[in-house]
Image (cartoon, rainbow, N blue to C red):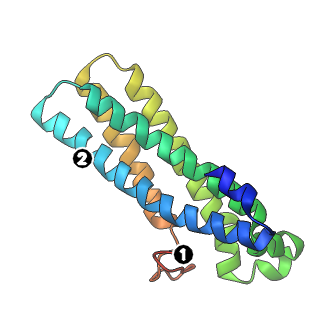
Amino acid sequence: MFSILLLCTDRKDMYQTLTFYHSFFRWLVLASLVLAIYRGCAGLIKNAAFSRSDNLVRHWTATIAHIQLMIGITLYAQSPVIKYFWNNKSAALKNLDTTFFALIHLILMLTAIVLITIGSALAKRRTADKEKFRTMLTWFAFALLIILAAIPWPFSPLANRPYWR
């Protein structure tokens, strides 16, 4: 994927490519979190063994979230909105859309990624299957709630963007 960025002829092409991948990976992050939360809940209810599949879901959920983080950080560094914010802080703070992307989105998404990382690491290290499911369910559910609040949905009063870019 990052090799595609090298083929971009100018910053505008790279910014649009990053925006597309960031939008695409949003859905992968959401789907993987929902699947991991479902597996955690189902495992707890059924008192099931934490299977290799459950462990793969845990691992890939964290991996997809980390890929999204890397795309997001790269996009943050290239974004004209962010550049405007840091060059004109006092004026930019009056604009909710700009403030959302420069600060709110960044802080909430970093927090969610930290929660996913901690939850994944703790679940991996638990010895009891029930505790693995409970840990994965709890940490990933909190992360999902934060992510849902921090996504610029088309209906969001903070900042809105289309479902696909």
Q: Nearer the viewer, mark 1 or mark 2?
A: 1
Q: Is residue 61 left or right of residue 76?
A: left
- Please give the name of the residue rendered at 42% of the width and 39% of the height, measured from the top-left corner: 60
- Please give the name of the residue rendered at 26% of the width and 39% of the height, measured from the top-left corner: 40
Q: Secondary structure at mark 2?
A: helix
| Other residues around mark 1 within 10 Å, as few (<14) / some (14–19) / many (≥20) | few
Q: Secondary structure at mark 1?
A: loop
Q: Is residue 104 visible?
A: no
Across and down, in percent, residue 130 comes to 23, 26
Query: Would you name the residue on which mark 1 appears?
Result: 165
User: With respect to residue 3, does 102 lie above or below?
Assistant: below
- Residue furthest left as drawn: 46
Across and down, in percent, residue 25 comes to 49, 58
Quarter location, residue 81: bottom right
Give the residue type that dot 1 points to: Arg
Q: Which of 11/92 is in front?
A: 11
User: With respect to residue 105, does 44 lie above or below?
Assistant: above
Across and down, in percent, residue 4 comes to 66, 56
Give the residue type that dot 2 points to: Tyr
Across and down, in percent, residue 10 comes to 81, 69
Q: Is residue 58 left or right of residue 63?
A: left
| Other residues around mark 2 within 10 Å, as few (<14) / some (14–19) / many (≥20) | some
- Residue furthest top as drawn: 127
Separation of marks 1 and 2 at Cα, in angstroms: 28 Å
- Please give the name of the residue rendered at 57% of the width and 79% of the height, measured from the top-left corner: 159
Query: Would you name the residue on which mark 2 appears?
Result: 38
- Please give the name of the residue rendered at 83% of the width and 82% of the height, measured from the top-left corner: 91
Q: Is residue 32 left or right of residue 39?
A: right
